[in-house]
Amino acid sequence: MQQMSRSYDAVIFDMDGVIIDSKELVESFWIENMKKYGIEIPKGDELELRFHGRPARLTVNDLFADLPESTREEIIEECARFDASVEKFKMIPGVEPFMKKCADSGIRLGLVTSALPEKVDRMLAGLSYPSPFDVRITADLVQNGKPDPECYLTAAQGLDVDPGRMIVFEDSISGVKAASEAGATVIGINEEHLSGPLLDAGAMLVIPNFSDAKLIHGELKVTIYPGSGHRENSFEVKKPG
């Protein structure tokens, strides 16, 4: 497990599962299509690893590897239509005020997602304030998707910060691996019973949502699961300049 750095220069958010609560929608889409083609559905940690955090093309080429390329392309197109059909996103509890507080405090913020720009634009349009992000890295801007660290290294370049001085919020095993491999400190966002795989992948700690994440005088404070003893972790995040 990573050791906590003394201070940080930027905070990075994944989107699906961190900002928007899309987990059930994502899983229902992949399960429905796997049933359609008679493919065995993964369970447990394997489901978490293969369903979440990666660009759609990587997921399709993994889950439907034995299908013809033309069929895989049809599934990718169907995935895009499915994403576009969601009119309003359900937000992860506490994330909107937390992001706004960070932005209002002058902290550099980044968004790193395996989604395409159109989905990001729709998410941002649903916020009650302008986009808080200084950098947005979407699937079309990198050659290698999560769990490859390229997306987080690209975000660090865009923010002009050392990757080791970034705090990253991630919900998936692939995302945690990508951020951890880039050298960032990772805070997992997921249900308590799924915290183990994220910790094993490199997360420093795991919280269920942003209800217990606070920004106090430029210092990020996070409370981990009550079952772990109500321990509070503090991360100092510096403003640029």
Image (cartoon, rainbow, N blue to C red):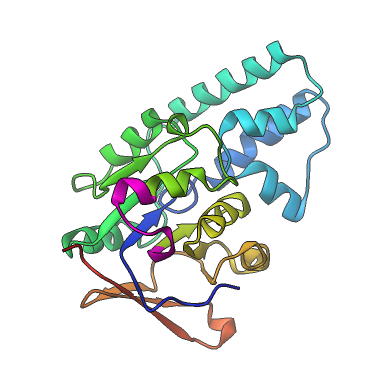
Left or right, 115 with respect to 236, comes to right
Residue 95 in the image: above or below residue 14: below
Q: Is residue 64 magenta?
A: no
Note whether residue 73 is visible: yes
Q: What residue do we see at 45% from left, 29% from top?
A: 140
In the rendered image, residue 1, in percent from the top left (x then y), is placed at 61, 73
In the rendered image, residue 137, in percent from the top left (x then y), is placed at 39, 40
Q: What residue do we see at 41% from left, 64% from top?
A: 167
In the rendered image, residue 16, in percent from the top left (x then y), is placed at 48, 46
Q: Nearer the viewer, residue 129 or 198?
A: 198
**Which segment did they paint magenta?**
156-166
Q: Nearer the viewer, residue 148 or 104?
A: 148
- Quarter of the image with the C terminus is bottom left
Hey, which quadrant is residue 89 in on the image?
Answer: top left
Left or right, 112 with respect to 204, comes to left
Determine the main secondary structure of the stretch shown in magenta: helix
Left or right, 189 with respect to 70, comes to left
Residue pushed farthest top?
Answer: 70
Residue 213 in the image: above or below residue 170: below
